[in-house]
Image (spheres, rainbow, N blue to C red):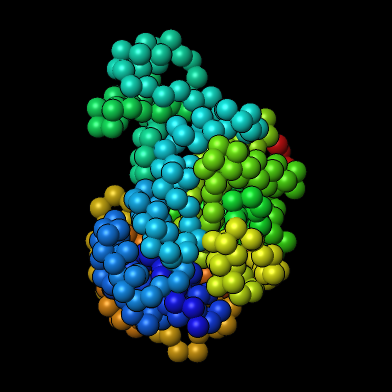
Amino acid sequence: MSKILLVGGGGREDAVARKIVESGGELFSALKNRNPSILGLSREHLIVDELDYTRIVDFAVSKGIELAFIGPDPVLATPLENELSKKGIMVASPTMDAARLETSKSFMRDLLTRHKIAGNIFSRLFRDKGDLQSFLSHETREFAVKPIGLTGGKGVKVMGVQLRNAAEALSYATQVLDHDGQVLLEERITGEEFSLQVFTDGSRIAATPLAQDFKRAYENDEGPNTGGMGSITDSNGLLPFIPRRSYDFALSVMQQIVVSMKKDGNPFKGVMYGQFMETAEGPKVVEVNARFADPESMNILSLFEGNFVELLYSIAEGNLKLNFSFLEQASVLKYVVPKGYGTDPVPGSLSVDLKSMPKDIMLYYAAVSGTKEKVEMSTSRSLALVGIAPTIEEASEMVDQNLNRIKGDYYIRHDIGSRHMMEEKMRKFRIS
């Protein structure tokens, strides 16, 4: 039985933990919160600041860990992978340098530009306030203002959405520049976003079903951005409002990125996901990330069929195995979050009834502690319910039908994957 170290304690990591154990791995975990599901699955665990890579490496060595998998994006910005590898521990996650695809937005844009990879958009990096002010004063285009590093999906502000005009854009961009020493402006694009996650050994890729994430806090995609309130996949691995050619395009972009990283002497091994937008001019690259998406990974892993531990080893060894598949079913995930999440969250307690849980419902534990039946919420996302059914609409209804299992003061977006939402998306698709 292989000893596998999992770093991270959120819902994404809970889904990974279950696949490791289901595949015969002996799970060891390093996490900052006492996630009751992950702890229950672990042979041993370390409660630790996940950025304290030295303690995690010492734990891994002391327990004889053979393979490690890193979940959270901030951890990928530390030397953890590099230090584990130095100790002879295999890692199915990218190096700190390769993870710059996500941890540095300017690195990603530069890679696309240098290797002439399609789907790139206009962007410009600023380090000088005068240059920034001069640029915005002469521009008629709208831009997304982005910090270079990680922001948990909450640091980007867009003109015409969170920023009403050029003056507000300049003010926010200046704040970012003052704080970080640099700021990135990217041309604003509009359309339908979709996510494509792939496994890669540094040369080849294996795709997972397309997914769509819903970041806005409130129904009808209103309110502030969050880490993600839910996500959907369809039974055929595509999305009903995204053309097949756009999926093929996205897959080609991901393959080109992997090839380009290897050419640069900076190979990427692990899970990579691209966030794309279907626009009137075709699909464009919004961002590229160096790990499983949250929440979309839970949809994917709920549908995964195969030996996940073997897959992780094949990634780490540079010999990707394709002996896995995905259920030909749709999935809908909805996150249970504390009231006020996205603005001023108020954590509390939740009671969970796990008796006679339908086999087509998965319940993942995220940024929580306590027990599986008595959950203590934090200020972040708490529980993820995934419904699996022949259609997106049925999967959405399945989640709502099982919400009576969760008692407490919380908020959830009911509209994700609903019939009304899907009809509206298809209406817009037909018009375009």
What residue appears at the point 45 percent right and 32 percent down from the top-left corner?
A: 106
**Along the line of sight, the residue nearer the viewer: 214 or 121:** 121
Residue 3 location in percent, x, y? 44, 77
Image quarter for residue 119? Answer: top right
Observer able to see residue 364: no
Residue 111 location in percent, x, y? 54, 33
What residue appears at the point 50 percent right and 83 percent down from the top-left corner?
A: 1
- In this rendering, is residue 141 above or below 240? above
- In this rendering, is residue 200 above or below 303? above
What residue appears at the point 26 percent right and 64 percent down from the top-left corner?
A: 55
Observer able to see residue 114: yes
Residue furthest right as drawn: 245
**Along the line of sight, the residue nearer the viewer: 383 or 320:** 320
Is residue 393 rendered to the left or right of residue 67? Answer: right
Is residue 357 rendered to the left or right of residue 7? Answer: right
Residue 264 location in percent, x, y? 55, 37
Give the number of callouts: 0
Residue 278 location in percent, x, y? 63, 39
**Quadrant assignment for the C terminus:** top right
What residue appears at the point 39 percent right and 58 percent down from the top-left corner?
A: 86
